[in-house]
Image: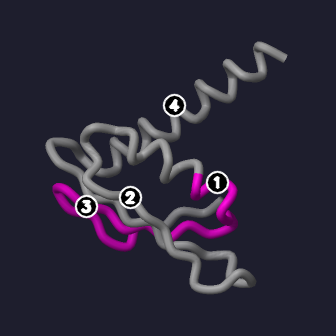
Amino acid sequence: MEIKVLEVGKDFAKLLIKGEDHTFLNLLQHYLVEDKNVVFAKYHISHPLNPEAELYVKTVDAAPLEVIKRANEKIVEDCDQLLGQI
């Protein structure tokens, strides 16, 4: 996965994510919208054969890159917990 920050501000971020598809991005979006500091989170893949997606996140009272980092950490925690139960 390659990530490029396209735009970032106090309460929004737009990232270009290469090498991922709906599998990871839908999961990330789900965890982002569960965060109380996220106003909205969405991603867009322009074409199924294009391995690039744009992720948009708008926050309130939180830095958007920190919110994205927390969501990824939560995904890792939940995956570790699941693997521990197997």
What residue do we see at 69% from left, 67% from top?
Answer: 19
Q: Nearer the viewer, mark 2 or mark 4?
A: 2
**Along the line of sight, which residue is nearer the eye, 3 or 29?**
29
Which numbered disc covers residue 24?
1
Q: Mark 1: give few (<14), some (14-19) or many (20+) Cα within 10 Å.
A: few
Percent across and percent down for residue 26 are: 58, 56
Instruction: Give the mark nearer the N terminus: 2 vs 3.
Output: 3
Residue 45, by quadrant, is bottom right
Residue on which the image places disc 3:
12
What's the CA distance linking mark 4 and mark 3? 20 Å
| Image: magenta residue range | 5-26
Instruction: Give the mark nearer the N terminus: 1 vs 2.
Output: 1
Residue on which the image places disc 2:
41
Q: Are marks 2 and 4 in contact (CB under 8 Å)?
A: no
Check the image and report above or below for 19 versus 84. Answer: below
What's the CA distance linking mark 1 and mark 4? 13 Å
